[in-house]
Image: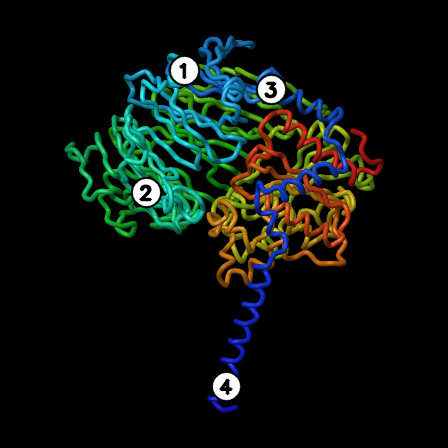
Amino acid sequence: MTSRQAVSVAAFVATTAALVRLIRTRALARDPLQWLEEVDSTKALAWVEKQNKALPVDGKGKTYERILEILDSKEKIPYVGKIGERYYNFWKDDKHERGIWRCTTLNEYEKKEPKWETVIDVDALAAQDKQKWVWKGYTLLDEGNDVEPERILVKLSPGGGDAVIVREFDIKTRKFLDASQKPFVIPEAKLQVSWKDRDTLLICTDFGPGSLTSSGYPRIVKEWKRGTPLADAKTVFEGKEADVIIGAGYVRERLGIEFQISSRAPGFYSNEIYVHSVTGLKNDDGSTFALPTVPLKIPVPDDADTNYFADQILVDLRSDWKGFKSGSLLSIPMVKLLAAASPEEVQATDLQPLFTPSERVALSGLTKLKTRLLVEILDNVRSRIDVWRFDAGGRKWIKDSVPEGQDGRNASMNMISTWALDGKHSDLYWSTTEGYTLPCTLSLVDVTGTHPTKVLKQEPTRYDAKDIVVEQFQATSKDGTLIPYFQVGRKSSSSSAAARPTLLYGYGGFEIPLTPAYQTTTGVSWLEKGNVYVCANIRGGGEFGPTWHQAALRENRNKAYEDFEAVAQDLIRRKVTTAAKLGIMGGSNGGLLMGNMLTRSPDLFGAVVCMVPLLDMKRYTKLLAGASWIAEYGDPDTSDWDFLQNYSPYHKLKAGTKYPPVLFTTSTRDDRVAPAHSRKMAKKMMDMGIKDVFHYENVEGGHGGASTNAQRAYMWTLCYQFLDKYLVDKGSNL
C-alpha cells in the first residue's frame, strides 16, 4: 500500500467512525420517551398517577404503623443548635406534620422531658400561605462576640426541593419582619445567602437571564442593601457559565479576625476561594496585614478544601502537594499563605500536618471548638477522633489528649460523631455514639476534661436485636482490590444453615462514606424477621479518602460496579443467601448503581429497589443540576460518551433479557435529580414487555423523596413490602 493509499484509508475510517457517531447521536436525540421529562405536564402526571395505582403492595399495615410511630415518637433525640443563650430544635411528630422550630434552655434540655417554646409553626405557616412548606433551615446574623443574636433568614421550600424562598425573622419578637421594617425577602430559587452586617447581604441567586451556570446554580455574587430593590444590588464577583456554582460569605473568626470571601467552583471537585477584605490579621512583626491584591485568590490546589481557625487556614488535600499525600489535613498561618503568589510558592516548612492518611485510614470530618480542633477519622470504616490544641501565641497546633470514651479505639463497629456546642466561645461539644444494633446516645463533652462527660439523651431500642450480630467481611473485586462490607443479622448456627433473604445496600460516589448507623426502619421491616442486611463500602465513596473515590471516577466507574458485584458474589459464596433471595437497594448515585446492577448482572439479584436515580446518562447533563456532576461521570456531549454509554442503564436494556423485579421511587418535586430518569426507565422496560416493573412517585419531597413523616413511612413500607414479596418464600406477611 502506498503512503497516499494509507492516508486515504485512514481518512475513510475516520469519516466512517464520525458518521456512525453522528447517526447514533441523532438516534439518541429522538428518544420517544422524552415527554416524560416534562415534570408537570398533564400527560406525564397522568402516567405517574396510573403507575402509583398499579403497585404490587399497598404501603400500609403493621410495618407502616411501626415506622410512623418511630418517626413521630416523642422519645427521638431532639438535636439542638445554640443561638444566644437558648437551644433550638426542629421537630416533627403526629401533631406537627410539617414541623415546629422551638427552643429551650440548656438546663431544661438536660431534663428527660424538657419544656419547649414554639418559635415558628411551619404547619400554621403552610395553612396561612396555602403552600406545602418544607423547612430548610436558617442563616444566622453574627454581629460579633458581644452582640446578642436576634435576626435569621428563614429558608422554606414549596414541596421539598432545593429551591427555597427566604424571609427575615426576629427571634426575640418571634415574628417575621413586616413591611415597615424593610425586611429581606428573596423569591424562590436555588440560592446561597450570607449576612455581611445587619443591613447588608451577600447574595447569590437567580437575577434573571444569564445569571445562572449551566448547572442551574447562581453565577453572580451581589451585595444587597436593606431597603433597596434586589435589582439594584451591586455585583462584587462573577463566575463563568460553565462553572458549577458561585458562593460568598463573611467570616468572623477567633482572635477578632474578619474577612469576606467569594468562591468559584469550575467543577464539582475544584474550588477557588477569593478574599475581598480582611481585618484584625497581624503580620509576624505585629503590624496590620493588608491584602496585596483585591480580590486575592487563596493559593492552594484547586481540588483542595479550605477551612479556617483563628489566623490559620486549614487545607484538606485531594491530591499530593508539597510532599504531603492526598487526603492530608494541613494548617498554615493565613499571613504566610496569602503572601504567596501561587500554590507553587507556598513554603512546605510553613505547613503543619494535622492528619496524614494511610491505605485504610481517612479523614472524616472536623469540629472547631474555642481552643481545640477535633479531627474525625475513619479507620477501616470505624471511627475515632484526634484532638489538637491551638497555641495562639506560637501560631501552631499541639496534639492533645482525647476525652475518655471518645477515641473510638474500643468502640467496635459503632460510630462517634461530634459537633460544637458554641464553637467560637466554648470547648464543649456534642457527641453521639451509635451502631447498626446500638441506639444513638447523645453526650455533652468537655474537651479540656474540666467537667465530666454528661450522657443527656438515649434513643430507645426500636426493634428486637436479640441474637443479631454485626460483622465486617471483605470481598475481592475483579482487579484484586479488597472491598469491606458490614453484615447485620442473626448468626447462622452452622455452615449448612438455609440461605436467608438478604438486602445489600450501596452508594459508591462523590466521596461519601457509608458508615454504621442504628437501623430503625430496616430493623422493624427486615432484621426482626430473621433476614440479613449488608452495607457495601465500594470504591467511589469516601471510606478511605480521595484515592478510594477517584479510583471509580468517569471511565473507571466500572470499578464501583465490579466491587458491588464482588460483595454480592461473596455473600452467595459464603452461603449467606442465594441470587433468588438477594435484594439490592440504593438511591441517587446509588440509584445509578442499582440501574447498572439491573442491566449488568440481572441473574445475580432477586429484586431491586432503585430510588431517586440517575439512569439516562446521555441526557443527564440536560436535566436540572446534572451538568454539575460532569467531574464525577463525564460529559456525554463529548467523546466521554464512548465510556459513559457502558454504564447508562437506560441505554443498556436488552429485549429478551430476564430482569429481576424492580421498584423505582422518585419525587415530582425533586429538582436535583430529575424524576424523568426513573419515569423513562420504568416506561421503557414496560414497553419492552418486561414483567414486574413498578414506579412510585411522591408528589412532593424533593431529592429525599418525602416531606412528612407519613410520606416517609409510606415510602419505606412500600420498599420493604416489595422486597418481602419477591424475596421471602411465603410472600408478604407485613
Residue 81 as seen in the image, left or right of residue 408? left
Mark 1 falls on what kind of element? strand
Residue carrying label 4? 6
- Residue 537 visible in rendering: no
Q: Which of marks 2 and 1 is in front?
A: 1
Is 238 located above or below residue 647 in the figure? above
Mark 3 falls on what kind of element? loop
Q: Which residue is drawn at 42% across and 49% down?
A: 267
Tell me which label, 2 or 1, sits earlier in the chain: 1
Residue 3 as seen in the image, left or right of residue 644? left
Tell me which label, 3 or 4, sits earlier in the chain: 4
Q: Which residue is drawn at 44% across and 27% down?
A: 155
Determine which of the numbered discs, if any, sits on residue 73 in the image.
none
Q: How crowded is mark 1: few (under 14 residues within 10 Å), some or many (20 or more)?
A: few
Tell me which label, 3 or 1, sits earlier in the chain: 1
Tell whether label 3 touches label 2 (CB within 8 Å). Answer: no
Residue carrying label 3? 459
* Viewer-side residue, 600 vs 33: 33
Residue carrying label 1? 175
Residue extending farthest to the bottom is 2
**Quadrant of res 490:** top right
Disc 1 marks a residue whose amino acid type is Lys
